Amino acid sequence: MKKCILIICLLCLILTGCYDAFDLYDATPEGYIDKVEHFDKYAWMDSTDYAYYKYSSDGEKLFKNNGDFLKVKKDDIDVLVKFYENFKEWMSLEERESEFDMKKTCITEGDYYRIENWWYGEAEQKDCLSDSWIDDDESEDDNDKKAEIEIKPIEEEGRIRLVKTDEKNAVKFSLMRYYNLYIYDTESSTLYYLHNDT
């Protein structure tokens, strides 16, 4: 009987939004002066969320020495654009194009980015590094070496880990499963947040 009551209480908390088991680490620096958030109100677990946060013209100082963000290099742009295009497709599939007003041209060298994906554990790690996830143009020796790579989650609450743009398989895994992408556009002093978990 106690178990039944506990389950009912937890369900009530989840359904009323008082308990969010997935509310983990938020990398958005404090100090923004305006925000627009479009969170997927119909999703219970899987969701596609978009937001942007405006900072004052000196907002870059919040990102410059912030260990949570990496500076965008020329080599990063193609991968960041892949995330942008993937996210745009999902917004289009959900008929939410009007909510997504970020432009691809916002992604430029000198901006700041952070990519997170959800760490599922050893089984998914093996899947991620198996032949089906490895790029076809790589040799079998490269595949064997990658199978020995240990991907470690970042040391924060929850099971989120950071992904760099040059980690091809982690990028591919993120695009297929789960990602949070933060891009700080230095020209407009705007931090864009793109989340997809589908």
Image (tube, rainbow, N blue to C red):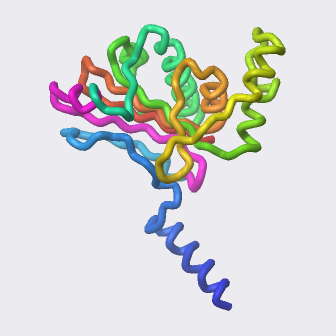
Can residue 137 be spotted in the picture?
A: yes
Residue 153 locus on image (x, y percent) = 57, 41
View extreme (left): residue? 57
Residue drawn at the location 64% of the way across and 89% of the way down:
2
Residue 126 locus on image (x, y percent) = 77, 36
Q: Nearer the viewer, residue 140 or 124?
A: 140
Q: Is residue 40 above or below residue 89?
A: below
Q: Is residue 21 left or right of residue 125?
A: left
Residue drawn at the location 72% of the way across and 44% of the way down:
122
Q: Which residues are magenta?
A: 43-63
Residue drawn at the location 27% of the way across and 20% of the way down:
186
Image quadrant where one finds the N terminus: bottom right
Residue drawn at the location 63% of the way across and 35% of the way down:
151
Q: Is residue 65 left or right of residue 149?
A: left
Q: Is residue 84 above or below residue 42?
A: above
Q: Nearer the viewer, residue 25 or 81?
A: 25
Q: Is residue 140 above or below residue 50?
A: above
Image quadrant where one finds the C terminus: top right
Q: Is residue 167 left or right of residue 139?
A: left
Can residue 96 be spotted in the picture?
A: no
Q: Is residue 29 magenta?
A: no
Q: Is residue 47 left or right of residue 74?
A: right
Residue 54 locus on image (x, y percent) = 24, 33
Q: Nearer the viewer, residue 69 or 1?
A: 69
User: Could you say which quadrant of the image residue 103 lies in?
Assistant: top left
Q: Is residue 57 magenta?
A: yes
